[in-house]
Amino acid sequence: MTARTVTLGSKSGLHARPAAMFVQKAKSFQSQISLSKNDKTVNGKSILSVISLGALKGDQVLLQTNGEDADAALENLAGLLEQDLG
């Protein structure tokens, strides 16, 4: 398992459009992907779960990946979260 704390860069945090973009990219990996904020951990491949975190711009989330392409998934998805996804 690999993990990294990421600061969200998107103006609207992880709401509708940015969450959809994240989930779409997450689904392209074989690894299990999860996001955590405070004490809540959700499936990174479920849009409703990701939105339910209520993560806003500047919030820190823990991105965890586990599987055969975990390192690639972590690098790719962390970079995505740090961007402004509109």
Image: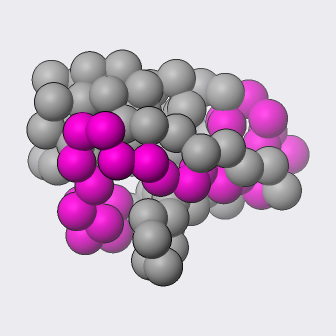
Nearer to me, 83 or 18: 83
Residue 61 forms part of the magenta stretch: yes
The answer to which of 6 and 21 lies nearer the viewer is 6
| Display coloring | one colour
Q: Quadrant of residue 18?
A: top left
Q: Quadrant of the N terminus?
A: bottom right
Residue 29, compared with residue 65, is above or below; it is above
Give me the residue at 54% from left, 33% from top.
Answer: 77
Vertical comparison of 27 with 11: above or below: below
Whether residue 42 is visible, yes or no, is no
Q: Quadrant for residue 81, please give it.
A: top left
Residue 21 position within the rendered picture, expressed as x and y whole percent measured from the top left: 31, 35
61 is higher (above) or lower (below) than 36: above
Please state which of residues 30 and 71 is positioned toward the viewer in this rendering: 71
Judged from this view, the residue extending furthest toward the bottom is: 39
Question: How many labels were placed on the picture?
Answer: 0
Q: Is residue 85 visible?
A: yes
Question: Which quarter of the figure is the C terminus placed in?
Answer: top left
Q: Judge from the rendering whether residue 48 lies leftward or rightward of residue 42; answer left or right.
A: left
The percent position of residue 19, horizontal first and vertical second, equals 27, 45
Residue at point 67%, 27% (across, down): 75
- Residue beneath the point at 52% across and 39% down: 6
Q: Give the residues in magenta.
A: 49-74
1 magenta-colored: no
Residue at 74% over, 29% down: 72
Judged left or right of residue 32, residue 62 is: left
Q: Position of residue 12 (x, y in %)?
A: 13, 38
- Give the x, y percent position of residue 55: 28, 55
